[in-house]
Amino acid sequence: MEEVKLLGAFPSPYAYRVEWALLHKGIKYEYIEEDLKNKSPLLLKCNPVHKKVPVLLHGEKSITESLVILEYIDETWKEKPLLPQDPFERAKARFWAKFAEEKCASVMPFVFCSEGEEHKKAAEEAREVLKILEEELKGKEFFGGVSVGFVDLVLGWIPHWLPVMEGVSGVKLLDADTFPAIYAWAERFLKVPFIKEKLPPSDGMLVYFTNIWRGLLNK
C-alpha cells in the first residue's frame, strides 16, 4: 500500500479540508507541518509552481491545490464519496465549490483587512455572497444533502475560522437572524465526528489572526 502524506501549515483551512476528506474516508496518513516562512526542500520540490500548501503525497505522486486534491482523494478511494454519483448533481457541486473559492474565500477575508469605503464595499459584497449561499442551503442539512459532501468541506472554514476573524476585527458577518440556514449548518458541521476530531485550536487561531490584524493596521 502506498504511503499517504500531507504537507500543511497552521491554520490553513485549505489543508484542513484535505485532512477532513482523509479522515472521512478512513485513510491513514502522515501530516507534515510546514513553516511557510522557511519552506522545506520537500515542499519546494513537490509544488515548484506555487510553493504553497496543501500538497498530498501518494507514494511517488504529488498533488497540489486543495480542490484538485479533494477530487483525487474521492476518485482514488471510492468508499464514502464526497461528490454525488449523478453527473448533473456532481456538476452542481463543482459549480458551488468554484463559487465558494472565487467569492467566499476571496471576498470575505478582505472585509477584515480593509477600512473606510473599501471596507464598506467589501462587507456589502460578502453579505450578498452569504445571501446566495443561504438560498442554496435552505431546506437542507448540508450542502451535500443529508451528509457532509464536497461543497461542505470547501466552505468548512466558515463555521470555525470566521468567528475568530470576526472577534479579532470586531466585524460581524454571520448571524442567526439574517442567515439562519447557514448559521444552523455551521453548528451542525462542527458536530460531525470527523470534523470535530480535526479543528485548529481557537486560542492559537486568535493569536495568529490578531498578529495579522495588527500588522495590517500598522502598514
Image: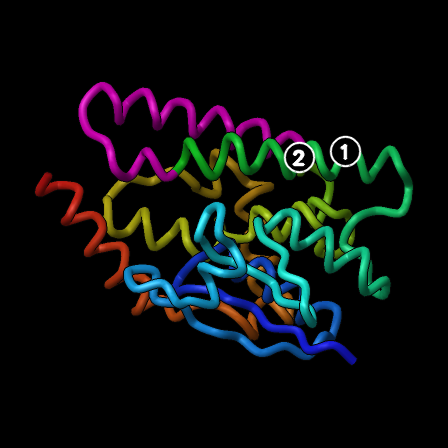
Residue 78, quarter of picture: bottom right
Is 33 magenta? The answer is no
Left/right placement of residue 75 relative to residue 179 reads right
Left/right placement of residue 44 relative to residue 36 reads right
Judge the density around disc 1: few (<14), some (14-19), many (≥20) Cα neighbours within 10 Å. Answer: some
Question: Which residue is label 1 attached to?
Answer: 92
In front here: 30 or 106?
A: 30
- Residue shown at 13% from the left, 41% from the top: 217
Residue 76, quarter of picture: bottom right
Q: Quadrant of the C terminus?
A: top left
Q: What's the magenta bit mostly, secondary-structure-wise? A: helix
Residue 179, horizontal then vertical, whole percent? 52, 37
In front here: 161 or 140?
A: 161
- Amino acid type, callout 2: Trp
Question: Which residue is label 2 attached to?
Answer: 96
- Residue shown at 54% from the left, 28% from the top: 131
Asked if residue 73 is positioned above or below residue 3 in the image, the reply reads above
Is 123 magenta? The answer is yes
Residue 91, horizontal then vertical, whole percent? 79, 34
**Distance in Å between CA atoms under marks 1 and 2:** 6 Å
- Amino acid type, callout 1: Lys
Helix, strand or loop at mark 2? helix
Q: Residue furthest left?
A: 218
Residue 57, quarter of picture: bottom right
Disc 1 + disc 2, Cβ < 8 Å: yes
Specify the segment rendered in magenta.
Answer: 109-136
Residue 22, horizontal then vertical, whole percent? 67, 68
- Residue shown at 30% from the left, 69% from the top: 203
Asked if residue 123 is positioned above or below residue 162 in the image, the reply reads above
- Residue shown at 54% from the left, 60% from the top: 46
Asked if residue 154 is positioned above or below residue 15 in the image, the reply reads above
Q: How many marks?
A: 2
